Amino acid sequence: MGNVLSILFCLSLFYVCITSRVKGFVTVLRIQGILLSIIIVIPFIYHFSVFGIILPVTILLVKVYLIPKYINKIILDLDIKRMIEPTIQQFSFLLLVIVTMTVIFIVTHILSQSTELNVIPFASGFSAIIIGIYIIMFRKKLIVHVAGFLILENGIFLFGTSVASELPVMIEMGMLLDVFVVVFLMGIAINNISTTLSGFDVTALGRLKD
Amino acid sequence: MGIEIIQGIISIIIIIGLAPLFAGFINKLKAILTGRIGAPVLLPYYELQKLFKKETIVATDSSFISRFSPLLNFIIMLIASAMLPIGFWKPLISFNGDIILFAYMLGLARFFQILAAMDIGSSFEGMGAAREATFALFAEPIFFFTLGSVAFISGQTSMYEIYHSIRLDNVSYIVFIIICSISAFLLAVTECSRMPIDDPNTHLELTMIHEVMILDNSGLDLYLYQYSGYIKLFIYGILEISFFYPFSAHSYLVGLIIFIFGAIILTFTLAIVETITSRFKMKNIPQYLLFATAIGILNLLIYTFTK
């Protein structure tokens, strides 16, 4: 079952590569949050524990409800344009992602021969980390960078679940780096960056000189 | 042996006979969903009948290619329809490796249609031909990666055997079938020039891909082109429906029932998709096609490295 959800996670990664709207990113973040919380709940179906339920519920609340809602609010408040402004074409981006994913699957296969790990969740998580970095590299808007960071972090989460089936609860809670992202978003919102930099365009930072 | 040949012939007759009905049914549903009464379901038959009676006029500058391209298209579609299983009936043409013959039969039909469009000498049709060639380039990998991944897993290379060998042992196989059917749906939409890729209803020069290539044909030529278009749509529909045969546990009768239900569900899906989506921008189409290819590649990767 975890494998099936990881495959769906990979499909959401492909979709994030071709979408050209900021709203698309928000939808994908919601879907990934739901998938991750189901993946974590599955082991607790057989032996129920209260601590086991806290984490999925928190993820559902933070990743599926709070953060996407906040991003949507910022998009509305700061009047951000709906298109994502890529620096390379989506087609080349998707090609790059396919090649990366192939390499990752091969590497994971080699790794799985020497250590014990679930190939599909491991490779999906790894791909999400790399694709998150790609999104930060190849997109101009700051709000999309935040989405890229969240995807990267979802990847770390999936990666963690594939390596060990049960981590101590406190460490798992530590993975909720999302709370850190809210600081980013608040920074964007409070400083009202769209007015000072006239848009969330990071290329403007390239013009800074000392 | 004898009964298999009869079943194969019946399959071809079903495909040829019901193909216009399938198209008519989609158009009717689409009209109902957009709040219109719509043309009768049998309209494609009436149109074909009308075209059959009309005089064929051929452009004066055109060569022999424009003359035989419509007939070739139609014959190729007949051969391709003889390779598809209907409800677990063994198709008439079935041998190891016919999956490649099937793909290139359709490729040959497209090639001659493009040549015929360029042969007439109108720049307008040349543009349509160029578009058709471009999108076909991106659509072909979808076919090979989707059906190819199933072939790779089952270890078979004949279409009948491939569809026959799908087993529903574990839950990941079901997900795999559903994912494959998504990319097969995208392939069908592209190859048959349906809504998100191409609009079959418009006759504007900027939006057309497929329709523009047959603008200068009339009478019997147009009849053959139209009919092969309907058959092509039905063929891709069957390609899609066949993914769901394993649910019938290999019984012929239940297979047929699944075929009928699948066809009805597919018409609904096509009509709903065509109602709720608008056409993609021309420059965005390749990335959506690559998305479908990526699904196939993902399938292949997963089954290669988890065995």
Image (tube, grey):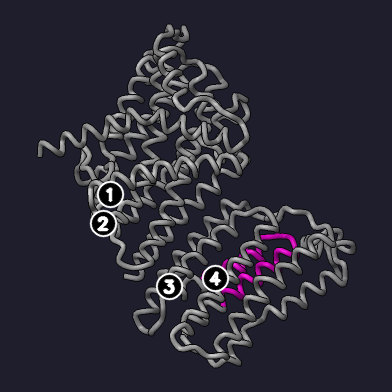
Q: Are marks 2 and 1 in contact (CB under 8 Å)?
A: yes
Q: Do the numbered discs 2 and 3 sit on residues whose CB atoms are within 8 Å?
A: no
The residue identified by callout 4 is A35
Please state which of residues A174 and A127 is positioned toward the viewer in this rendering: A174
Amino acid type at circle 3 is: Met
- Tell me the residue at 37%/76% (across/down): A110
Q: Chain of mark 2?
A: B
* Residue identifier under label 3: A1
Residue B293 placement, left or right of A176: left
Q: Looking at the picture, which amino acid does disc 2 mark? A: Ala
Quickly name the residue at label 2.
B249
Mark 2 and mark 4: span between their CA atoms? Answer: 31 Å
Q: At which x and y percent is residue B299?
A: 40, 60
Closest to the camera, between mark 1 and mark 3, is 1
Residue A128 in the magenta stretch? The answer is yes
Q: In the rendered image, which quarter is residue A150 located in?
A: bottom right
Disc 4 marks a residue whose amino acid type is Leu
Element type at mark 2: loop
Q: Which residues are magenta?
A: A127-156
Residue linked to disc 1: B254
